[in-house]
Amino acid sequence: MVDLVGELKSVVGTRYVLTSESATYGYRKGFRFGDGRVEAVVIPGSLVELWRVSKLAVESGRIILMQAANTGLTGGSTPDGNDYDRPIILISTRRLKGIQLLGEGRQVVCLPGADLYELEEKLAPLGREPHSVIGSSCIGASVLGGVSNNSGGALVQRGPAYTEMALYGQVDAEGRLNLVNHLGIRFPDEAVAESVLDALEHGRYSPDDVDWSGTRKAHDDDYVNRIRQVDEASPGRYNADPGRLFEASGNAGKLIVFAVRLDTFPAAKDTAVFYLGTNRTDTLEKVRRHLLTAFEELPVAGEYMHRDAFAIADEYGRDTVALIRFLGTKHLPLMFRLKARVDAFARRFSWVPDGLSDLLMQSGSRFLPSQVPARMRAYHETYDHHLMLRVSGTLARQVRPWLESFFTEGQEVEGAFFECTAQEGTLAFLHRFAAAGAANRYVAVHGRKTGGMMALDVALRRNDWEWQERLPPEVDDQLLLKLYYGHFLCHVMHQDYVVRPGVDPMEVETTMMWPILDKRGARYPAEHNVGHLYHAPQSMAAHYRSLDPCNCLNPGIGRQTKKKNWVAESV
Protein backbone atom coordinates (compact mmCIF):
# COMPACT_ATOMS: atom_id res chain seq x y z
CA MET A 1 0.00 0.00 0.00
CA VAL A 2 1.33 3.44 -0.95
CA ASP A 3 2.28 5.60 2.04
CA LEU A 4 0.87 8.86 0.68
CA VAL A 5 1.67 10.87 3.79
CA GLY A 6 5.25 9.66 3.64
CA GLU A 7 5.51 10.64 -0.04
CA LEU A 8 4.08 14.06 0.70
CA LYS A 9 6.67 14.55 3.43
CA SER A 10 9.42 13.65 0.96
CA VAL A 11 8.21 16.47 -1.31
CA VAL A 12 7.68 19.33 1.17
CA GLY A 13 9.44 18.13 4.33
CA THR A 14 8.00 16.58 7.48
CA ARG A 15 7.42 19.97 9.08
CA TYR A 16 4.94 20.94 6.39
CA VAL A 17 2.71 17.87 6.46
CA LEU A 18 0.25 18.09 9.36
CA THR A 19 -1.89 15.16 10.44
CA SER A 20 -2.89 15.58 14.10
CA GLU A 21 -6.25 17.05 15.03
CA SER A 22 -4.70 19.98 16.90
CA ALA A 23 -2.17 20.80 14.16
CA THR A 24 -4.79 20.78 11.39
CA TYR A 25 -7.49 22.64 13.33
CA GLY A 26 -6.63 26.14 12.06
CA TYR A 27 -6.87 24.92 8.46
CA ARG A 28 -9.93 22.66 8.52
CA LYS A 29 -12.01 25.01 10.71
CA GLY A 30 -13.58 27.84 8.72
CA PHE A 31 -13.43 31.49 9.75
CA ARG A 32 -17.18 31.41 10.51
CA PHE A 33 -18.43 28.12 9.13
CA GLY A 34 -17.17 24.66 8.18
CA ASP A 35 -15.20 21.83 9.77
CA GLY A 36 -14.35 18.19 9.07
CA ARG A 37 -11.63 15.59 9.00
CA VAL A 38 -8.66 15.65 6.64
CA GLU A 39 -6.03 13.01 6.01
CA ALA A 40 -3.35 15.69 5.98
CA VAL A 41 -2.72 19.39 5.58
CA VAL A 42 0.19 20.03 3.22
CA ILE A 43 1.95 23.40 2.98
CA PRO A 44 4.20 23.45 -0.11
CA GLY A 45 7.01 25.99 -0.36
CA SER A 46 7.26 26.35 -4.15
CA LEU A 47 5.06 26.07 -7.22
CA VAL A 48 6.92 22.89 -8.22
CA GLU A 49 6.17 21.40 -4.80
CA LEU A 50 2.52 22.39 -5.21
CA TRP A 51 2.44 20.59 -8.58
CA ARG A 52 4.06 17.45 -7.15
CA VAL A 53 1.79 17.37 -4.11
CA SER A 54 -1.29 17.84 -6.29
CA LYS A 55 -0.15 15.13 -8.68
CA LEU A 56 0.40 12.65 -5.82
CA ALA A 57 -3.03 13.40 -4.38
CA VAL A 58 -4.77 13.04 -7.74
CA GLU A 59 -3.00 9.79 -8.63
CA SER A 60 -3.84 8.29 -5.23
CA GLY A 61 -7.54 9.05 -5.64
CA ARG A 62 -7.74 11.67 -2.90
CA ILE A 63 -9.87 14.77 -2.80
CA ILE A 64 -7.89 18.00 -3.04
CA LEU A 65 -9.11 20.98 -1.07
CA MET A 66 -7.22 24.18 -1.95
CA GLN A 67 -6.97 26.87 0.70
CA ALA A 68 -5.50 30.36 0.59
CA ALA A 69 -5.95 32.54 3.69
CA ASN A 70 -9.04 30.78 5.13
CA THR A 71 -10.81 34.12 5.61
CA GLY A 72 -14.02 33.10 3.81
CA LEU A 73 -17.39 33.28 5.53
CA THR A 74 -19.25 30.40 3.87
CA GLY A 75 -16.87 27.48 4.45
CA GLY A 76 -15.74 27.26 0.84
CA SER A 77 -12.14 26.29 1.57
CA THR A 78 -12.65 23.92 4.50
CA PRO A 79 -14.22 20.45 4.77
CA ASP A 80 -17.99 20.30 5.17
CA GLY A 81 -18.55 17.50 7.63
CA ASN A 82 -17.25 13.93 7.38
CA ASP A 83 -19.45 12.38 4.70
CA TYR A 84 -16.99 12.45 1.79
CA ASP A 85 -16.41 9.28 -0.21
CA ARG A 86 -12.62 9.77 -0.35
CA PRO A 87 -9.97 11.08 2.06
CA ILE A 88 -9.13 14.79 1.83
CA ILE A 89 -5.73 16.37 1.31
CA LEU A 90 -6.00 20.04 2.20
CA ILE A 91 -3.30 22.12 0.50
CA SER A 92 -2.51 25.48 2.06
CA THR A 93 -0.82 28.01 -0.25
CA ARG A 94 0.22 30.47 2.45
CA ARG A 95 3.96 29.90 1.86
CA LEU A 96 3.71 30.53 -1.88
CA LYS A 97 4.36 34.26 -1.77
CA GLY A 98 5.29 36.24 -4.84
CA ILE A 99 4.17 39.30 -6.81
CA GLN A 100 5.71 40.25 -10.15
CA LEU A 101 5.19 43.61 -11.84
CA LEU A 102 4.43 43.80 -15.55
CA GLY A 103 4.60 46.92 -17.70
CA GLU A 104 5.98 49.12 -14.89
CA GLY A 105 3.17 48.02 -12.61
CA ARG A 106 0.23 48.38 -15.00
CA GLN A 107 -0.40 44.70 -14.33
CA VAL A 108 0.79 42.15 -11.80
CA VAL A 109 1.27 38.41 -11.65
CA CYS A 110 0.32 37.05 -8.22
CA LEU A 111 1.29 33.63 -6.89
CA PRO A 112 -1.15 31.69 -4.66
CA GLY A 113 0.04 33.01 -1.29
CA ALA A 114 0.17 36.71 -2.20
CA ASP A 115 -2.23 38.71 -0.06
CA LEU A 116 -3.91 42.02 -0.74
CA TYR A 117 -1.85 43.87 1.84
CA GLU A 118 1.41 42.82 0.18
CA LEU A 119 0.09 43.80 -3.23
CA GLU A 120 -1.07 47.18 -1.95
CA GLU A 121 2.35 47.77 -0.36
CA LYS A 122 4.24 46.82 -3.53
CA LEU A 123 2.16 49.11 -5.74
CA ALA A 124 2.08 52.15 -3.44
CA PRO A 125 5.51 53.55 -4.49
CA LEU A 126 4.29 53.43 -8.11
CA GLY A 127 1.17 55.46 -7.32
CA ARG A 128 -1.04 52.51 -8.16
CA GLU A 129 -3.50 50.26 -6.32
CA PRO A 130 -4.83 46.70 -6.63
CA HIS A 131 -8.44 45.71 -7.21
CA SER A 132 -9.28 45.93 -3.50
CA VAL A 133 -7.53 47.98 -0.84
CA ILE A 134 -10.15 48.32 1.89
CA GLY A 135 -11.73 45.67 4.07
CA SER A 136 -10.36 42.40 2.74
CA SER A 137 -6.79 43.64 3.01
CA CYS A 138 -7.46 44.21 6.69
CA ILE A 139 -7.94 40.50 7.37
CA GLY A 140 -5.13 39.15 5.24
CA ALA A 141 -7.26 37.80 2.37
CA SER A 142 -5.31 36.44 -0.59
CA VAL A 143 -5.44 37.78 -4.13
CA LEU A 144 -6.12 34.34 -5.62
CA GLY A 145 -8.82 33.65 -3.06
CA GLY A 146 -10.65 36.75 -4.23
CA VAL A 147 -10.42 35.77 -7.88
CA SER A 148 -11.40 32.15 -7.21
CA ASN A 149 -14.53 33.26 -5.37
CA ASN A 150 -15.56 36.28 -7.48
CA SER A 151 -15.19 38.32 -4.32
CA GLY A 152 -16.58 41.82 -4.28
CA GLY A 153 -15.19 44.80 -2.46
CA ALA A 154 -15.76 48.36 -1.39
CA LEU A 155 -14.29 50.08 -4.45
CA VAL A 156 -17.09 51.38 -6.65
CA GLN A 157 -15.02 51.75 -9.81
CA ARG A 158 -13.60 48.21 -9.98
CA GLY A 159 -16.29 45.60 -9.48
CA PRO A 160 -15.75 42.00 -8.37
CA ALA A 161 -12.34 40.33 -8.58
CA TYR A 162 -12.02 38.97 -12.12
CA THR A 163 -9.45 37.95 -14.68
CA GLU A 164 -9.28 35.80 -17.78
CA MET A 165 -5.52 35.37 -17.45
CA ALA A 166 -4.30 32.54 -15.24
CA LEU A 167 -1.96 29.56 -15.01
CA TYR A 168 -3.69 26.57 -13.48
CA GLY A 169 -3.77 22.80 -13.06
CA GLN A 170 -6.90 20.98 -14.16
CA VAL A 171 -7.89 17.37 -13.54
CA ASP A 172 -9.56 15.86 -16.61
CA ALA A 173 -12.29 13.22 -16.78
CA GLU A 174 -9.67 10.45 -16.80
CA GLY A 175 -8.13 11.73 -13.58
CA ARG A 176 -5.01 13.26 -15.15
CA LEU A 177 -3.58 16.54 -13.91
CA ASN A 178 -2.77 18.96 -16.75
CA LEU A 179 -1.16 22.40 -16.70
CA VAL A 180 -2.99 25.12 -18.63
CA ASN A 181 -1.17 28.37 -19.41
CA HIS A 182 -3.56 31.22 -20.15
CA LEU A 183 -1.35 33.73 -18.35
CA GLY A 184 -0.30 35.46 -21.55
CA ILE A 185 3.39 34.81 -20.83
CA ARG A 186 5.62 32.48 -22.86
CA PHE A 187 8.01 30.17 -21.06
CA PRO A 188 10.75 27.85 -22.31
CA ASP A 189 9.90 24.14 -22.27
CA GLU A 190 6.14 24.82 -22.27
CA ALA A 191 5.49 21.07 -22.53
CA VAL A 192 7.16 20.40 -19.16
CA ALA A 193 4.94 21.56 -16.30
CA GLU A 194 7.65 21.78 -13.66
CA SER A 195 9.88 23.79 -16.01
CA VAL A 196 7.10 26.33 -16.60
CA LEU A 197 6.27 26.64 -12.91
CA ASP A 198 9.89 27.06 -11.87
CA ALA A 199 10.49 29.68 -14.56
CA LEU A 200 7.41 31.62 -13.49
CA GLU A 201 8.22 31.56 -9.79
CA HIS A 202 11.74 32.85 -10.40
CA GLY A 203 10.75 35.36 -13.07
CA ARG A 204 12.72 33.71 -15.85
CA TYR A 205 10.96 35.40 -18.73
CA SER A 206 11.61 38.64 -20.61
CA PRO A 207 9.30 41.59 -21.39
CA ASP A 208 9.11 40.26 -24.95
CA ASP A 209 7.54 37.06 -23.59
CA VAL A 210 4.56 38.99 -22.22
CA ASP A 211 1.53 39.25 -24.52
CA TRP A 212 -0.16 42.68 -24.38
CA SER A 213 -2.60 42.08 -27.24
CA GLY A 214 -5.58 42.58 -24.93
CA THR A 215 -7.59 39.61 -26.15
CA ARG A 216 -8.18 38.52 -22.53
CA LYS A 217 -9.40 40.81 -19.75
CA ALA A 218 -7.54 41.32 -16.49
CA HIS A 219 -10.39 43.00 -14.62
CA ASP A 220 -14.17 43.42 -14.88
CA ASP A 221 -14.00 46.43 -17.19
CA ASP A 222 -17.77 46.67 -17.70
CA TYR A 223 -18.64 47.14 -14.04
CA VAL A 224 -18.75 50.95 -14.12
CA ASN A 225 -21.35 50.85 -16.88
CA ARG A 226 -23.47 48.28 -15.03
CA ILE A 227 -23.48 50.11 -11.73
CA ARG A 228 -24.53 53.38 -13.36
CA GLN A 229 -27.70 51.73 -14.68
CA VAL A 230 -29.74 52.64 -11.61
CA ASP A 231 -33.13 51.88 -13.22
CA GLU A 232 -32.34 48.23 -14.04
CA ALA A 233 -34.44 45.68 -12.14
CA SER A 234 -31.47 43.38 -11.44
CA PRO A 235 -28.40 43.45 -9.21
CA GLY A 236 -25.16 44.94 -10.52
CA ARG A 237 -22.94 42.20 -9.11
CA TYR A 238 -23.32 38.82 -7.47
CA ASN A 239 -21.20 35.68 -7.30
CA ALA A 240 -23.22 33.53 -9.66
CA ASP A 241 -23.37 36.10 -12.48
CA PRO A 242 -22.66 33.93 -15.57
CA GLY A 243 -20.81 36.82 -17.19
CA ARG A 244 -18.19 36.74 -14.44
CA LEU A 245 -17.47 32.96 -14.46
CA PHE A 246 -14.41 32.22 -16.57
CA GLU A 247 -11.80 29.53 -15.86
CA ALA A 248 -9.99 30.62 -12.68
CA SER A 249 -12.49 33.42 -11.99
CA GLY A 250 -15.17 31.91 -9.81
CA ASN A 251 -13.59 28.45 -9.87
CA ALA A 252 -14.22 28.01 -6.09
CA GLY A 253 -11.34 25.56 -5.69
CA LYS A 254 -12.22 23.49 -8.75
CA LEU A 255 -8.80 24.28 -10.23
CA ILE A 256 -5.29 24.38 -8.79
CA VAL A 257 -4.41 27.98 -9.59
CA PHE A 258 -0.68 28.72 -9.67
CA ALA A 259 -0.87 32.37 -10.72
CA VAL A 260 -3.24 35.06 -11.94
CA ARG A 261 -2.56 38.20 -13.94
CA LEU A 262 -4.47 41.32 -12.96
CA ASP A 263 -4.77 44.97 -13.89
CA THR A 264 -3.76 47.63 -11.39
CA PHE A 265 -5.21 51.12 -11.12
CA PRO A 266 -3.97 54.69 -10.56
CA ALA A 267 -4.34 55.61 -6.90
CA ALA A 268 -6.89 58.34 -6.21
CA LYS A 269 -5.14 61.55 -5.17
CA ASP A 270 -6.05 64.01 -2.43
CA THR A 271 -9.14 62.07 -1.43
CA ALA A 272 -11.88 63.55 0.74
CA VAL A 273 -14.38 61.77 2.98
CA PHE A 274 -17.93 63.02 3.53
CA TYR A 275 -20.03 61.62 6.38
CA LEU A 276 -23.82 61.65 5.90
CA GLY A 277 -26.61 60.93 8.36
CA THR A 278 -30.38 60.65 7.90
CA ASN A 279 -33.47 58.94 9.26
CA ARG A 280 -35.02 58.49 5.81
CA THR A 281 -33.91 55.73 3.47
CA ASP A 282 -35.11 57.58 0.39
CA THR A 283 -32.65 60.37 1.20
CA LEU A 284 -29.72 58.02 0.83
CA GLU A 285 -31.21 56.48 -2.29
CA LYS A 286 -31.43 59.93 -3.89
CA VAL A 287 -27.78 60.48 -3.01
CA ARG A 288 -26.82 57.11 -4.49
CA ARG A 289 -28.59 57.74 -7.77
CA HIS A 290 -27.18 61.21 -8.19
CA LEU A 291 -23.61 60.18 -7.46
CA LEU A 292 -23.82 57.32 -9.97
CA THR A 293 -25.42 59.27 -12.80
CA ALA A 294 -24.65 62.99 -12.53
CA PHE A 295 -20.84 63.07 -12.47
CA GLU A 296 -18.31 61.93 -15.02
CA GLU A 297 -16.21 60.33 -12.25
CA LEU A 298 -17.51 57.82 -9.71
CA PRO A 299 -16.70 57.94 -5.99
CA VAL A 300 -13.93 55.68 -4.70
CA ALA A 301 -16.21 54.10 -2.07
CA GLY A 302 -19.63 54.56 -0.50
CA GLU A 303 -20.13 52.56 2.70
CA TYR A 304 -23.35 52.27 4.68
CA MET A 305 -23.91 51.47 8.35
CA HIS A 306 -27.12 51.30 10.35
CA ARG A 307 -27.26 52.77 13.85
CA ASP A 308 -27.37 49.32 15.50
CA ALA A 309 -24.36 48.06 13.55
CA PHE A 310 -22.57 51.27 14.52
CA ALA A 311 -23.12 50.58 18.23
CA ILE A 312 -22.15 46.90 18.09
CA ALA A 313 -18.99 47.70 16.08
CA ASP A 314 -17.98 50.29 18.66
CA GLU A 315 -18.28 47.86 21.55
CA TYR A 316 -17.17 44.61 19.92
CA GLY A 317 -14.82 45.87 17.23
CA ARG A 318 -12.90 48.70 18.83
CA ASP A 319 -9.82 46.52 19.40
CA THR A 320 -9.78 45.73 15.66
CA VAL A 321 -9.92 49.46 14.85
CA ALA A 322 -7.20 50.23 17.39
CA LEU A 323 -4.96 47.45 16.11
CA ILE A 324 -5.19 48.60 12.50
CA ARG A 325 -4.95 52.26 13.50
CA PHE A 326 -1.70 51.90 15.41
CA LEU A 327 -0.06 48.84 13.80
CA GLY A 328 -1.49 48.89 10.28
CA THR A 329 -2.79 45.84 8.44
CA LYS A 330 0.64 44.22 8.09
CA HIS A 331 0.41 42.24 11.33
CA LEU A 332 -3.22 41.13 11.04
CA PRO A 333 -2.58 37.84 9.21
CA LEU A 334 -0.25 36.85 12.06
CA MET A 335 -2.88 37.88 14.60
CA PHE A 336 -5.49 35.69 12.91
CA ARG A 337 -3.11 32.72 12.92
CA LEU A 338 -2.42 33.21 16.62
CA LYS A 339 -6.15 33.47 17.24
CA ALA A 340 -6.69 30.12 15.50
CA ARG A 341 -3.94 28.52 17.59
CA VAL A 342 -5.50 29.74 20.83
CA ASP A 343 -8.87 28.30 19.82
CA ALA A 344 -7.26 25.02 18.75
CA PHE A 345 -5.51 24.72 22.11
CA ALA A 346 -8.68 25.57 24.01
CA ARG A 347 -10.65 22.95 22.13
CA ARG A 348 -8.61 20.21 23.78
CA PHE A 349 -10.29 20.91 27.11
CA SER A 350 -14.04 20.48 27.56
CA TRP A 351 -14.14 22.95 30.45
CA VAL A 352 -12.75 25.83 28.34
CA PRO A 353 -15.52 27.96 26.78
CA ASP A 354 -15.88 28.14 23.02
CA GLY A 355 -14.39 31.23 21.39
CA LEU A 356 -11.66 31.66 24.00
CA SER A 357 -9.66 34.03 21.78
CA ASP A 358 -12.67 36.31 21.31
CA LEU A 359 -13.37 36.30 25.03
CA LEU A 360 -9.78 37.29 25.78
CA MET A 361 -9.71 40.02 23.13
CA GLN A 362 -13.03 41.43 24.27
CA SER A 363 -11.80 41.52 27.87
CA GLY A 364 -8.78 43.50 26.73
CA SER A 365 -10.83 45.86 24.60
CA ARG A 366 -12.74 47.07 27.65
CA PHE A 367 -9.63 49.00 28.63
CA LEU A 368 -9.61 50.81 25.28
CA PRO A 369 -11.42 54.09 24.74
CA SER A 370 -13.97 54.28 21.95
CA GLN A 371 -12.28 54.74 18.58
CA VAL A 372 -15.24 56.67 17.16
CA PRO A 373 -14.64 60.42 16.58
CA ALA A 374 -16.92 62.85 18.41
CA ARG A 375 -18.78 64.10 15.32
CA MET A 376 -19.57 60.54 14.23
CA ARG A 377 -20.80 59.73 17.72
CA ALA A 378 -23.10 62.76 17.62
CA TYR A 379 -24.55 61.54 14.31
CA HIS A 380 -25.11 58.13 15.92
CA GLU A 381 -27.25 59.79 18.58
CA THR A 382 -29.34 61.56 15.92
CA TYR A 383 -29.57 59.37 12.81
CA ASP A 384 -30.45 55.76 11.99
CA HIS A 385 -28.61 55.64 8.67
CA HIS A 386 -24.97 56.55 8.06
CA LEU A 387 -23.12 56.82 4.74
CA MET A 388 -19.38 57.34 4.26
CA LEU A 389 -18.27 58.67 0.89
CA ARG A 390 -14.66 58.67 -0.22
CA VAL A 391 -14.02 60.66 -3.41
CA SER A 392 -11.00 61.95 -5.28
CA GLY A 393 -9.94 65.55 -4.86
CA THR A 394 -11.32 66.34 -8.30
CA LEU A 395 -14.73 64.88 -7.57
CA ALA A 396 -14.80 66.46 -4.10
CA ARG A 397 -14.89 69.93 -5.70
CA GLN A 398 -18.15 68.92 -7.40
CA VAL A 399 -19.73 66.82 -4.65
CA ARG A 400 -19.14 69.32 -1.84
CA PRO A 401 -21.39 72.09 -3.21
CA TRP A 402 -23.97 69.56 -4.37
CA LEU A 403 -24.28 68.07 -0.87
CA GLU A 404 -24.61 71.55 0.63
CA SER A 405 -27.43 72.31 -1.79
CA PHE A 406 -29.06 68.91 -1.39
CA PHE A 407 -29.39 69.16 2.39
CA THR A 408 -30.39 72.86 2.58
CA GLU A 409 -32.70 73.68 -0.31
CA GLY A 410 -35.88 71.89 0.73
CA GLN A 411 -35.74 68.92 -1.63
CA GLU A 412 -37.88 66.77 0.67
CA VAL A 413 -34.83 65.28 2.28
CA GLU A 414 -33.86 64.98 5.90
CA GLY A 415 -30.37 64.75 7.34
CA ALA A 416 -26.98 66.41 7.33
CA PHE A 417 -23.35 65.87 6.38
CA PHE A 418 -19.88 66.98 7.33
CA GLU A 419 -16.51 66.72 5.65
CA CYS A 420 -14.12 64.57 7.67
CA THR A 421 -10.64 65.49 8.73
CA ALA A 422 -7.99 63.03 7.55
CA GLN A 423 -8.12 61.18 10.89
CA GLU A 424 -11.92 61.16 11.01
CA GLY A 425 -12.06 59.76 7.48
CA THR A 426 -9.66 56.96 8.33
CA LEU A 427 -11.51 56.04 11.52
CA ALA A 428 -14.90 56.19 9.82
CA PHE A 429 -13.93 53.50 7.34
CA LEU A 430 -12.09 51.41 9.94
CA HIS A 431 -15.17 51.52 12.15
CA ARG A 432 -17.33 50.40 9.24
CA PHE A 433 -15.12 47.39 8.52
CA ALA A 434 -14.87 46.45 12.18
CA ALA A 435 -18.60 45.76 11.91
CA ALA A 436 -17.84 42.69 9.79
CA GLY A 437 -16.60 40.73 12.81
CA ALA A 438 -18.61 42.41 15.54
CA ALA A 439 -21.61 40.07 15.46
CA ASN A 440 -19.34 37.03 15.62
CA ARG A 441 -17.60 38.52 18.66
CA TYR A 442 -20.97 39.30 20.25
CA VAL A 443 -22.05 35.67 19.94
CA ALA A 444 -18.73 34.40 21.31
CA VAL A 445 -18.96 36.67 24.33
CA HIS A 446 -22.62 36.06 25.15
CA GLY A 447 -22.52 32.33 24.52
CA ARG A 448 -25.67 30.62 25.78
CA LYS A 449 -27.66 33.86 25.73
CA THR A 450 -27.92 33.50 21.96
CA GLY A 451 -28.69 30.71 19.52
CA GLY A 452 -25.85 31.70 17.20
CA MET A 453 -25.76 33.88 14.12
CA MET A 454 -26.26 33.93 10.38
CA ALA A 455 -24.49 36.25 7.96
CA LEU A 456 -25.92 37.16 4.57
CA ASP A 457 -24.40 39.30 1.84
CA VAL A 458 -27.13 40.39 -0.52
CA ALA A 459 -27.11 42.05 -3.94
CA LEU A 460 -30.19 44.26 -4.27
CA ARG A 461 -31.79 45.32 -7.52
CA ARG A 462 -30.22 48.46 -8.93
CA ASN A 463 -33.63 50.19 -9.11
CA ASP A 464 -34.71 49.20 -5.59
CA TRP A 465 -35.90 52.27 -3.67
CA GLU A 466 -37.14 50.09 -0.78
CA TRP A 467 -33.68 48.83 0.13
CA GLN A 468 -34.20 48.72 3.89
CA GLU A 469 -35.33 45.27 4.98
CA ARG A 470 -38.68 44.94 6.73
CA LEU A 471 -39.16 41.51 8.28
CA PRO A 472 -42.52 39.97 9.15
CA PRO A 473 -43.18 39.47 12.88
CA GLU A 474 -42.78 35.69 12.69
CA VAL A 475 -39.19 36.18 11.54
CA ASP A 476 -38.38 39.25 13.61
CA ASP A 477 -39.44 37.46 16.79
CA GLN A 478 -36.68 34.89 16.24
CA LEU A 479 -33.92 37.53 16.33
CA LEU A 480 -31.96 39.28 19.04
CA LEU A 481 -29.93 41.54 16.76
CA LYS A 482 -30.16 42.72 13.16
CA LEU A 483 -27.02 44.41 11.88
CA TYR A 484 -26.97 46.08 8.47
CA TYR A 485 -23.94 47.52 6.70
CA GLY A 486 -22.59 47.35 3.20
CA HIS A 487 -21.36 48.78 -0.09
CA PHE A 488 -24.26 51.12 -0.62
CA LEU A 489 -23.47 52.63 -4.02
CA CYS A 490 -23.23 49.08 -5.42
CA HIS A 491 -26.44 48.09 -3.57
CA VAL A 492 -24.64 45.21 -1.85
CA MET A 493 -25.66 44.81 1.77
CA HIS A 494 -24.21 42.69 4.57
CA GLN A 495 -26.89 41.50 6.96
CA ASP A 496 -25.86 39.79 10.20
CA TYR A 497 -28.50 38.30 12.47
CA VAL A 498 -28.08 36.97 16.00
CA VAL A 499 -30.91 34.58 16.88
CA ARG A 500 -32.55 33.91 20.21
CA PRO A 501 -31.56 30.92 22.38
CA GLY A 502 -33.05 27.69 21.14
CA VAL A 503 -33.46 29.00 17.58
CA ASP A 504 -31.56 27.28 14.77
CA PRO A 505 -29.98 30.06 12.67
CA MET A 506 -29.67 27.88 9.56
CA GLU A 507 -33.34 26.92 9.80
CA VAL A 508 -34.32 30.60 9.98
CA GLU A 509 -32.03 31.48 7.09
CA THR A 510 -33.13 28.74 4.70
CA THR A 511 -36.85 28.60 5.44
CA MET A 512 -37.58 32.24 6.25
CA MET A 513 -34.87 34.60 5.02
CA TRP A 514 -34.17 33.11 1.60
CA PRO A 515 -37.82 33.22 0.46
CA ILE A 516 -38.02 36.87 1.54
CA LEU A 517 -34.94 37.75 -0.48
CA ASP A 518 -36.19 35.79 -3.49
CA LYS A 519 -39.44 37.73 -3.41
CA ARG A 520 -37.49 41.00 -3.38
CA GLY A 521 -35.56 40.00 -6.51
CA ALA A 522 -32.26 40.02 -4.61
CA ARG A 523 -29.36 37.67 -5.35
CA TYR A 524 -27.23 36.03 -2.68
CA PRO A 525 -24.48 35.60 -1.87
CA ALA A 526 -23.26 38.81 -3.41
CA GLU A 527 -19.52 38.53 -2.79
CA HIS A 528 -18.54 35.71 -0.42
CA ASN A 529 -19.48 32.92 -2.84
CA VAL A 530 -21.81 29.98 -2.26
CA GLY A 531 -19.37 27.91 -0.21
CA HIS A 532 -21.12 24.99 1.48
CA LEU A 533 -24.05 27.12 2.64
CA TYR A 534 -25.84 28.04 -0.58
CA HIS A 535 -27.12 26.12 -3.57
CA ALA A 536 -25.15 26.93 -6.71
CA PRO A 537 -27.53 27.98 -9.50
CA GLN A 538 -27.47 26.01 -12.73
CA SER A 539 -24.97 28.22 -14.56
CA MET A 540 -22.53 28.10 -11.66
CA ALA A 541 -22.90 24.32 -11.22
CA ALA A 542 -22.22 23.89 -14.95
CA HIS A 543 -19.07 26.00 -14.55
CA TYR A 544 -17.87 23.73 -11.74
CA ARG A 545 -18.54 20.58 -13.76
CA SER A 546 -16.69 21.90 -16.80
CA LEU A 547 -13.64 22.75 -14.69
CA ASP A 548 -13.61 19.53 -12.65
CA PRO A 549 -15.28 16.67 -14.55
CA CYS A 550 -14.15 14.03 -12.03
CA ASN A 551 -15.31 16.08 -8.99
CA CYS A 552 -11.89 15.65 -7.42
CA LEU A 553 -11.42 19.20 -6.14
CA ASN A 554 -13.60 20.71 -3.41
CA PRO A 555 -16.57 18.39 -4.02
CA GLY A 556 -19.84 19.46 -2.44
CA ILE A 557 -19.29 23.15 -3.06
CA GLY A 558 -22.56 24.93 -3.77
CA ARG A 559 -24.54 22.06 -2.19
CA GLN A 560 -23.59 19.84 -5.12
CA THR A 561 -22.83 16.13 -4.76
CA LYS A 562 -19.61 15.13 -3.00
CA LYS A 563 -19.42 11.87 -4.95
CA LYS A 564 -16.67 11.09 -7.44
CA ASN A 565 -17.56 11.78 -11.07
CA TRP A 566 -20.61 13.77 -9.98
CA VAL A 567 -22.61 10.65 -9.12
CA ALA A 568 -26.04 11.79 -8.01
CA GLU A 569 -26.81 11.56 -4.32
CA SER A 570 -29.33 8.87 -3.37
CA VAL A 571 -32.69 10.21 -2.32
Image: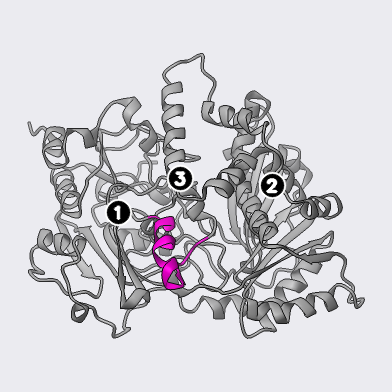
Three-letter amino acid code of the residue under disc 2: Leu
Element at label 3? loop
Question: First in sequence: mark 3 or mark 2?
Answer: 3
Alpha carbon distance from label 3 to label 2: 28 Å
Label 3 packing within 10 angstroms: few (<14), some (14-19), many (20+): some
Which residue is disc 2 drawn over? 483
Three-letter amino acid code of the residue under disc 1: Lys
Three-letter amino acid code of the residue under disc 3: His
Which residue is nearer to you in this view: 334 or 289? 334
Label 1 packing within 10 angstroms: few (<14), some (14-19), many (20+): some
Which numbered dot is residue 97? 1
Residue under the image location 35 percent in, 26 percent down: 22
Which residue is nearer to you in this view: 418 or 226? 418
Q: Is residue 531 magenta?
A: no
**Residue 379 shown left or right of residue 200 in the figure:** right
Which residue is disc 3 drawn over? 331
Element at label 1? loop
Which numbered dot is residue 465? none
**Residue 373 shown left or right of residue 200 in the figure:** right
**Residues rendered magenta in the picture:** 115-133
Residue under the image location 46 percent in, 73 percent down: 127
Question: First in sequence: mark 3 or mark 1?
Answer: 1
Residue under the image location 71 percent in, 80 percent down: 397
